[in-house]
Amino acid sequence: MLRLATASLAGTAIEFYDFALYGTAAALVLGPLFFPSFSPLAGTLAAFGTFGVGFLARPIGAVLFGHIGDRYGRRPVLFLSLILTGAATVAVGCLPTYASLGILAPVLLLLLRFLQGLGLGGEWGGAVLLTAEHAPANRRALWASFPQTGPSIGFLLANGVMLAMSALLTDAQFSAWGWRVPFWFAGVLAVAGLLLRTSLEETPDFRRLAEQDERSGAPFAEIVRGHWRLVLLTAGALSLGYALVYTMSTWALAHGTEKLGVDRTVMLGCIMAAVFLKGPLIPLAAMLGDRFGRRPMCLTGCAISALWVFPMIALLSTAEPVWMFLGFLGGALSFAAMFSVVGAYLPELYEPRVRCTGAAVGYNLAGVLGGALTPIIATALSQGAGPPWGVAGYLTGMAVLSLGCFALLPETRPVAARAVGAGAAPA
């Protein structure tokens, strides 16, 4: 289990490195380089627009790779998605800017971001199912939290490399070529991830489906016919997590540097410190999910988020590093409570024959609802003087939506885990 979970964690870390790297670059540098004829604000919005395209591609990737995972196995998904995302990310680092290619440059940037989103849409389902379907019932949330920890590591790695380039280079050097280096580094990470995954075995659940010839012929069609309500509820439930993450990591980065006048290295440092502390808490919270259930952890995270968003915006508006860090930390901890158990919760909601498609589509639709438009909406709501209370109101609304959806979802903690929690022998 440790080998499987480590390989899953490494894969999601690498894929989310690629995805988070683009968000950071969109906030700091892509607007002037690829949309120079716009005003600074319009250029940032345009860069965030290409950022959002990646989220729109993710459900399509979930359908495509979910079909592969439900028909041909979870293992092939892990290789194909990593190759696609890594290649697209390296290509962004090689892409000429508007000054060299004209209008073709932002068009190609849009295409590469779309391909990046396709790959990530498949990665999560394959990585989570690899651990969840191998794990013992009474420790499933814990083991499935390993790939959920990967995004934090990927985010830290992406922003760490970007922070190093920003600190070591002048503004002119960073804009000329420094921002490209983190994208090139994605190729090294992709090769390392592929090597880690070469020895992985197919999951017991899929082998059983294949042996009994019970694989779905059209998993997405089955999901639409029989599980559409479940998909919409999971998408709505998880949307708050995405909104929180991309408010803190993308919009706040642009807002802090452009409107509050905070140095970009300071902003990156505050966000990274909060994410660094969040990472180890995810498996700890997952253990509580194995003990007390998936839904209680998710409801708790939503409630904390709803109470914290106004203080978070107030602390951000001080432009003081310590207070900004505390604001981000509260948001990160509420996210950890929710998403620590999602790696077990979503697979348990779907039957094995359509599990890869159902879990991935619900998870990635949440990205569209909560992540794709959040930086754009938050940027629009933060114009004018004073703290951007409109952003806090928007996040509160997302928290209410997620809370309601989680309340309508069933508890899925296996009976065996409940028996162990009550002191009985595991089934």
Image: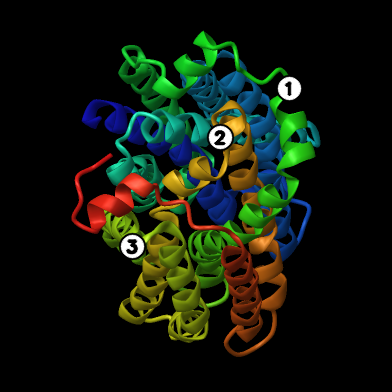
Q: Which mark is residue 218?
A: 1
Q: Position of residue 54 (x, y in %)?
A: 66, 41
Q: Which mark is residue 120?
A: 2
Crowd rating for badge 2 (residues with CA inside 10 Å; few <14, some 14–19, many 20+):
many
- Which kind of residue does numbered mark 2 sit on? Leu
| Residue plotted at (70% across, 59% down) | 373
Q: CA distance from mark 2 to mark 1?
A: 21 Å
- The answer to whether residue 263 is visible is no
CB within 8 Å, label 2 to label 1: no
The nearer-to-camera label among 2 and 1 is 1
Quadrant housing the C terminus? top left
* Residue named by callout 3: 292
Side (left or right) of 313 relative to 228: left
Q: Position of residue 249 (x, y in %)?
A: 49, 60
Q: Position of residue 151 (x, y in %)?
A: 41, 45
Q: Is residue 253 above or below residue 56?
A: below
Side (left or right) of 311 relative to 163: right
- Which kind of residue does numbered mark 1 sit on? Ala
Crowd rating for badge 3 (residues with CA inside 10 Å; few <14, some 14–19, many 20+):
some
Secondary structure state at the residue bearing disc 1: loop
Locate residue 10: give its quadrant. Answer: top left
Q: Which mark is residue 80?
A: none
Q: CA distance from mark 2 to mark 3?
A: 30 Å
- Which kind of residue does numbered mark 3 sit on? Phe
Secondary structure state at the residue bearing disc 2: helix
Secondary structure state at the residue bearing disc 3: helix
Locate residue 246: give its quadrant. Answer: bottom right
Dot 3 or dot 1: first in sequence order is: 1
Dot 2 or dot 3: first in sequence order is: 2
Q: Position of residue 319 (x, y in %)?
A: 43, 80
Quadrant housing the N terminus? top left
| Residue plotted at (73% across, 53% down) | 46
